[in-house]
Image (tube, grey):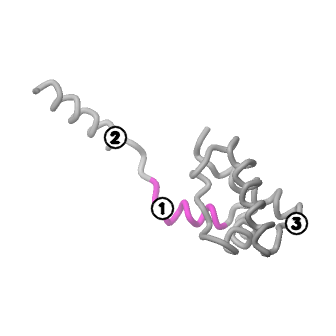
Amino acid sequence: MKRVITLVGLAVLLAACGEKVDPRIEQDKLRRSPGFSEARRVCAQCHALPSPNQHPPVAWPSVVARMENYIRGSNKRMPTQSEHDALLGYFQKNSSWK
């Protein structure tokens, strides 16, 4: 039992050693990122803007394609090709998954 408590304590201690990032700084960085306004405009037709960290970069093309299928079937405004490229780039470049 002592070993388990020690291991849990060490895990908590190691987790606390991570670098802290101010969420306001992160949000500001995302707002200034290319493609943010396109992503917000297109996504807000149906839901809140998702975090780029929701998926790894490689998954975003299929997620965006799936969302465009919903838009196509729901009588909403489809993104232009340049909007599509900008918002896809926004999600892929800002995903913290590597």
Q: Nearer the viewer, residue 61 or 92?
A: 61
Q: Which amino acid type corresponds to the residue marked 2 in the rendered image? A: Ala
Q: Nearer the viewer, residue 92 or 13?
A: 92
Q: State the image coordinates of residue 6 (x, y, percent, origin top left).
A: 17, 29
Q: Please, is residue 38 above or below residue 2 in the view?
A: below
Q: Which amino acid type corresponds to the residue marked 1 in the rendered image? A: Pro
Q: Which residue is mark 1?
A: 23
Mark 1 or mark 3, earlier in chain: 1
Disc 2 to disc 1: CB gap under 8 Å: no
Label 1 Cα neighbours within 10 Å, binned few <14 / some 14-19 / many ≥20? few
Residue occupying image coordinates x 27% and y 40%: 12
- In magenta, the rendered stretch is 21-31
Side of 56 where 5 appears, left or right = left
Q: CA distance from mark 1 to mark 3?
A: 31 Å
Q: Which residue is mark 3?
A: 80
Which one is closest to the eye, mark 1 or mark 3?
Answer: 3
Q: Which residue is mark 2?
A: 15
Mark 2 or mark 1, earlier in chain: 2
Dominant secondary-structure state across the stretch colored magenta? helix
Disc 3 to disc 2: CB gap under 8 Å: no
User: Which residue lies most toward the top here?
Assistant: 3
User: Which residue lies most toward the left here?
Assistant: 2
